[in-house]
Image: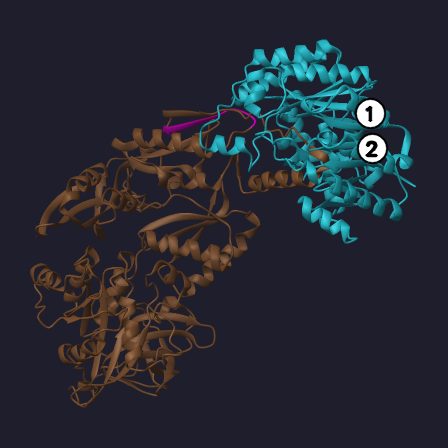
Chain colours: A cyan, B brown
Amino acid sequence: MKEVGLYIHIPFCRSKCLYCDFNSFPCREDDAPEYTEALLRELNAYQERYNFIYKTVFIGGGTPTVINCRLIGEIMDKIAPRIKAGAEISMESNPGTVTFDTLRYYRSLGINRLSIGLQAWQAGLLRGLGRIHTAGDFLNAYYWARESGFDNINTDLIFALPNQTSDMWKETLDKVISIGADHISCYSLILEEGTVFYNLYKEGKLQLPDEESDREMYRIAVDTLGSNGYRQYEISNFARKSMECRHNLVYWRNEEYLGVGAGSHSKLEGRRFWNHKDIDRYISLVTEGKLPVEGQEELSVDEDMWETIFLALRLNEGLDMAGFNSKYGVDFRTRYGSQLKRLMAQGLVFIESDRLKLTKKGIDLSNSVFVEFA
Amino acid sequence: MAGDRQKHIRNFCIIAHIDHGKSTLADRLIEKTGVISARDMEEQVLDNMALERERGITIKLQSVKLNYKAQDGEEYILNLIDTPGHVDFTYEVSRSLAACEGAVLVVDATQGIEAQTLANVYLALDNNLELYPVINKIDLPSADPEFVKKEIEDVIGLDASNAALVSAKEGINIEEVLEGIVKYIPHPAGDEDEPLKALIFDSFYDSYKGVIAYIRVMDGILKPGMNMRMMSNGKEYEVVEVGTLKPWLNPTGLLMAGDVGYVTASIKNVKDVRVGDTITDADNPCKEALPGYRKVTSMVYCGIYPADGADYDNLKDALEKLQLNDAALLYEPETSIALGFGFRCGFLGLLHMEIIQERLEREYNLDLVTTAPSVIYHITKTNGEKLEVSNPTNLPAPQEIEYMEEPIVKATIMTPTEYVGAIMELCQNRRGTFRDMQYMEEKRAILNYDLPLNEIIYDFFDALKSRTKGYASFDYELKGYEKSDLVKLDILLNTEAVDALSFIVHKDKAYARGRSMAEKLKEVIPRQMFEIPIQAAIGTKIIARETVKALRKDVLAKCYGGDITRKKKLLEKQKEGKKRMRQVGSVELPQEAFMSVLKLND
């Protein structure tokens, strides 16, 4: 019996947000029953083969709440026997796609953590992002969720948006704090190739805040959330006491997880592998009785060590050097002596009770730190 | 005495401006005379290096013996000696020409005479060659052969009434060219009974036979077993093999006056077989060597460093191998504080430099950092000592310099008249001295300027092309050295001078260059974890300053759905980019920074 995290991907959306490059397909909800059918078969294949116990579950997308909620019910029925008692079971949602009834239903399935994509408070900014909801829709969803018994609610926010000012960002944070969200994710907008935003930017039609403003907004988030009882535990994540997302900790602690659904990623037994992104391809492969795996990567010890380091450094708890030494049979301080010396001299990392951590500056320049250990 | 044998030989070359169709015409002549069957014929057999193909130019000489039965019923041997078609290789061209009695002058029927056409014509006339005009590309709609004929007559003063009108591409009138060669180009008239006198016009290294010298026998005979002597250095060798060029080596056992062919003599080093040198019989030497020999001189220098210091030995091996076939390539080890161990390399000119760099990267798979090109400056120190400096780093302190001299070239620029103003402005900017201007006809002019070579080696050619929409053509030759008010411009990054970025510039241009160099570096140096001041300085005086702001953000926020692989790829890419940087003091410099000086717009 092996304890792993389980990720379930629902690749459907009502409409594609302009910045989104995730594996999601708008207006294809009609395919959801067939897709869910395939998903159950894929889950079944793994469950037959391996004796996994799911210590965390995360249903992500796309927008899981855009498909008929009964389909989520079918999925939960399938995995319920394998879920560890007391496990965190999260689901992502979009405010425009939930009702009091559906939320109550989700809660009744055992889903105990809801993540709501708000992104920004201001109607103008939301429109600019191509979001299908308003702040009002968010508030409705939030209170319905509370009423339904969700006592662990996350809110996703994005900063450094086109035309966003520091004041707007501050307002967004204040609103979310005031309603008492348990967990807040703050992502800096990244322009990904192939998105509408990326193309607009290339054409010079997108005014983005500069790096200075981006860092200022980040600083505002860290300070505002920190002084309101939200502890930063990862570069982009903040939570009230013991409300950290346990599923995401699985990734950052470089533990094992299984991902099912189109385009999902898994890490099992020193191997990373990922599924085909295309829904039709995914469905047809699974229907033929095959695993829908598109590619895989066998990790060398060196690579695994690097992944462990850079994932751990994303967390405020940092890298447990003693743990690292016993896991890999090396001495961290010797092996990375020159990097440590350089990075400490640059004020990017520090060591605290045998844990290596990023400084504030180190967080801003985290990629530069990570590549040092490659 | 020219025997009957020599009356049936024609030694000729083809001269043309680049792209006027020299190689294509050569192909057709070879095809027509059946040296190589059509099936075996690869396009443009004379241009056999991949790089030459790509650039459409000939670098390494090739020669071929053609057998042709003329309309008079007689069998003729036509030795076609190929010439490289670029200004850098003027000396090599002149030696090939010296091996001939005549030249086929190819002019594009749509373009007319260009700068290189003229330069080559002058070279041919210097070597007393008979010119036989061929007007090519008559199949093109814009062809105007009558106009071109008139131009040849007016500009060169050559009777063009016998010019062949051809299309090498379409194979039109090729026979007429062969007839014209027999008819208009004189046969050799050497004396077989005189002591051996043979001109080396090319050489290359073969790992089995040693150096193979391409020669033209002027007088006497050459055969295996003879002792031959190189007249420039007195070295003697026993002849192993002689033969003709088909173009592959075809041993014949004998070469006689008037013949073109090759000789091998187990010679180890291509440097001992110098183009332009005279071979004679060691046991019965001729009195005087053939005129025109000179040692090739490198005009342009640059530092070449391995991007990865571990590749130093590989770079050294590669340079050694290239030099086997390229006596004009010089290299010696040098060290730079910024770049570590590398080589200072000397080239005939800019094109030669680019070709060597490309061959090192392509054929030897080396990743290189090259410094900005420099010329050789002549320095006279206050203590009377004289020295030559090709690396700005080696320039003595200003107070020790009495005066400096820099190389000046005679530049010939041919252009449609509408661009004369733009070109004059360009030459003025580049410290040119106007010599004269001639109108070839109403619409075209030749501008003659004296220009400092160090103004040409940067981006003169590109600037010329862009100001004239590509219509102007350009040629130059070294004129000599002249006193000049030059200074060394240093670049300081984070207050430390970076030796590999120093360059020598005229005092009047130092401020502008310093400013644009600092600006350019600001563009190419990526932001780092701290602010980097970029300063341009003459001595201790700072003349320009820019700042690369500190990197504030290098963070990927979202790690979505466990897709670590993608994030890792991004980081690996970043790491790869970092590896390509040179750590200079505390600053990381991209390789392109070292070539920045080449890309300044002024």
Q: Nearer the viewer, residue B198 or A81?
A: A81
Q: Is residue B440 magenta?
A: no
Quadrant position of the C terminus of chain B in the picture: top left
Q: Which residues are magenta?
A: B529-538
**Labels 2 and 1 touching (C-beta < 8 A):** yes
Residue type highlighted by circle 1: Tyr
Our reading of the magenta stretch's main secondary structure is strand
Q: Does residue B412 sit above or below A196 in this rendering?
A: below
Q: Does residue B484 sit above or below A217 in this rendering?
A: below
Residue B521 horizontal/vertical position (percent): 42, 33
Q: Residue at x 15, y 39 (%)?
A: B421
- The verdict on a common chain for dots 2 and 1 is yes
Query: How packed is label 2: few (under 14 Cα within 10 Å), some, or many (20 or more)?
Result: some
Check residue A318 in the rendering and tell me which mark sits there, or answer none: none
Q: Residue at x 57, y 34 (%)?
A: A192
According to the image, label 2 marks what residue?
A: A73
Q: Is residue B235 left or right of residue B421?
A: right
Check residue A105 in the rendering and tell me which mark sits there, or answer none: 1
Q: Nearer the viewer, residue B127 or A45?
A: A45
Residue B542 horizontal/vertical position (percent): 37, 24
Q: Is residue B537 magenta?
A: yes
Q: Residue at x 17, y 43 (%)?
A: B419
> What is the chain letter for disc 1?
A
Between discs 2 and 1, the one toward the N terminus:
2
